[in-house]
Amino acid sequence: MSSVNLKQLAQALDLSVSTVSRALNDSYEISAATKEKVQLLATQLGYQPNPYASSLRRQQSRTIGVIIPEVANNFFSLAINGIEEVARQNGYHVLIYLTHETFAQEQTIVQHLANGRVDGILISVSGETQDAAHFAKLRELNLPTVFFDRVCEEVATAKITTDDYDSGYRATRHLLDMGCRRIMHLTLAHHLSIGQKRMRGYLDALRDADLPFDDTLLIRGGPNAAQNTAHVRQLLEQDAHIDGIFASVESLAIAGYRACHQAGRRIPNDVKIIGFSNLEMADLLDPPLTTIRQPAYAIGKEAATLLFRALLKNQPILASQSLELKSELVVRASTGG
Amino acid sequence: MSSVNLKQLAQALDLSVSTVSRALNDSYEISAATKEKVQLLATQLGYQPNPYASSLRRQQSRTIGVIIPEVANNFFSLAINGIEEVARQNGYHVLIYLTHETFAQEQTIVQHLANGRVDGILISVSGETQDAAHFAKLRELNLPTVFFDRVCEEVATAKITTDDYDSGYRATRHLLDMGCRRIMHLTLAHHLSIGQKRMRGYLDALRDADLPFDDTLLIRGGPNAAQNTAHVRQLLEQDAHIDGIFASVESLAIAGYRACHQAGRRIPNDVKIIGFSNLEMADLLDPPLTTIRQPAYAIGKEAATLLFRALLKNQPILASQSLELKSELVVRASTGG
DNA sequence: TTTATTCACGGAAACGATTCCGCAACGGGG
DNA sequence: CCCCGTTGCGGAATCGTTTCCGTGAATAAA
């Protein structure tokens, strides 16, 4: 669509197409004088190489794909921020795909990216994903892939995660320290390693406090916020002894707040709440929410950096390059006195 | 990069490349029997057309570009959600670019998209943008463009906005009705029409209440949240009579909250606050924030729908197709009693 | 039977950039 | 003076699809 192409430049300069191309790519075979002439006219006419012709010939697109469950989510939007920054610095473009937490969409998206459209993929898998078969094709095609936050353990590639087991343990431990004895655990991605790690942290903290694990205290949430709230409320009303809620994602912490309001349980007097969250205004909630804050921006940045290191140096991505960043426990009033 | 291409398919089937291509595109010139054979083998071998070869030949990329100031923002991430949904339904891909509210980045991005990489553009301009010259090229190239929310009036194309003047008026009027007499106005995009419209609503509401406009009550915020807060706090401490804050974007409403806390002004007793916001948990803040809620998801969806109508039918986008959606005033405790 | 038309397909030219190969001209060394 | 290497550039193939044009055979129309 760009009005001017190589052939037109070549004609105007009375040079061949190949010479013009080489001049623009700063090839050593072209004299300084010619280079200057070519580049001058190119900028004058506003020449921009056709990206598709270039990609076709070079067999690379200077584009990466980012697959995430949701974008209207503080964690993922911060991560995208980090990703986009690194991509732009390297002159790459970013294609965004949303799975809406469904496995089917994740499959189709991954499939559609296995045709050379992107040079690499960053992915945080959907809550439904249990099978990693759809990632096999990427491996087969040698398409560099980095998982972040919600990873697939089975796939042998690099993964950027946070200390999920530890965070789960510390969150639960904090509730216990504040006096909780019957702690609800709200989880979304319970099939995923991330969910299981946080859960194991929860379980181990209970065990270390010599508290039994009660299966009924476990709520597996879904994408529907109203339903999650109703679910939590129901449990709160059934079980008057519940005095703590550990939410493994932000939206479920919110569900916890709403459910407590509806069930007439005061936070933190009756029920203390802690949740994973990247909400910058967690301190302005009523009451301020105690959070485990993941370094979302850094996660995106690290994942992208790892990917580009592989892309630019044309090296494979190794599982050994995986990184685990630390989350931060920020104590506020929702778990206070 | 996809392992199998048309030529290989053709050889395997003992057909010509053109026949295979036509069979896969369901051309009327190909017999049903051949079509079936071709499609069977194609799916068996997992054939996927090379998107770049296809784009090069067809002169269209089945990709749209979305340019926004920030993604870590409830409004924009909801809008992207709407955009992505419509794009996926139409089989299009979405390239995301962030300007980080800077004019320079907006220029470079727009320039880089004027080479056929995308078939259309959805844009919400940066807070710094005052000049529309960089959009001229898009018009020149006939690259369909739709503005949403933060629009450029000078550019003759369709724009999806909300009733900004009205919202500004209603927000201010609400504060007046609740007894405010000295209302601070926090704005971000004061050069943009969106900022000016909201401001005019503010001014007209003051005028209709026979209140004078005081220039010192106007704060032009920037991208730095801490600085904005400090700015608001300073003004609050200087002027003890301020009893209302009207924030034209969510982040500035938050700055208002923080500033009030720091300056020891109670909300809503001393100062009442209203702000544009798409925060789903505005009701969980302390106190719950009275908001003007924009239909962010719908805006994204409408903008994308308009763009695709033009793309698919190959029609130009007319300014007359512009749409103005209604925002909603949600009264909560931050402007109460 | 002859001609016209449709059907089903093949060949080859695009799309625009990159790159392999080849080739003049020129300069320096023997 | 001749040979050879270097410098600077042109021609053409190539990436994988799409599509224009052509063509043989079968069928229909006359």
Image: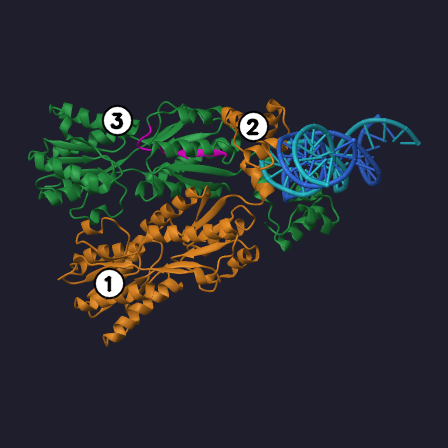
Chain colours: A orange, B green, C cyan, D blue
| Amino acid beneath label 2 | Ala
Closer to the chain start, of discs 1 and 2, is 2
| Amino acid beneath label 1 | Ile
| Residue topped by disc 1 | A245
Instruction: Identify which residue is drawn at 36% across, 63% down.
Output: A195
Q: Give the CA distance from mark 3 to mark 1.
A: 45 Å
Q: Position of residue B32 (x, y in %)?
A: 70, 45
Does residue A10 appear to the left or right of A249 in the view shown?
right
Q: Give the CA distance from mark 1 to mark 2.
A: 72 Å
Does residue B319 appear to the left or right of A172 in the view shown?
right
Placement of A66 over or under B222, stated as above or below: below
Helix, strand or loop at label 1? It is strand
Q: Quadrant of the N terminus of chain A?
A: top right
In the foreground, C2 or A69? A69
Q: Give the CA distance from mark 3 to mark 2.
A: 51 Å
Q: Disc 2 is attached to a residue of which chain?
A: A
Q: Is residue B124 magenta?
A: yes
Q: Disc 1 is attached to a residue of which chain?
A: A
Give the foreground label among 3 and 2: 2
Q: Start and end of the magenta stretch?
A: B119-129
Q: Is residue A49 magenta?
A: no
Residue furthest to the left in view is B240
Placement of B255 over or under A219, stated as above or below: above
| Amino acid beneath label 3 | Gln
| Residue topped by disc 3 | B196
| Residue topped by disc 2 | A33
Could you say which disc has been placed on residue B116 in the image?
Answer: none
Label 2 Cα crowd, 10 Å radius (few <14 / some 14-19 / many 20+) = few
Q: Position of residue A225 (x, y in %)?
A: 31, 53
Does residue C25 appear to the left or right of B119 in the view shown?
right
Helix, strand or loop at label 3? It is helix
Q: Position of residue B219 (x, y in %)?
A: 19, 32
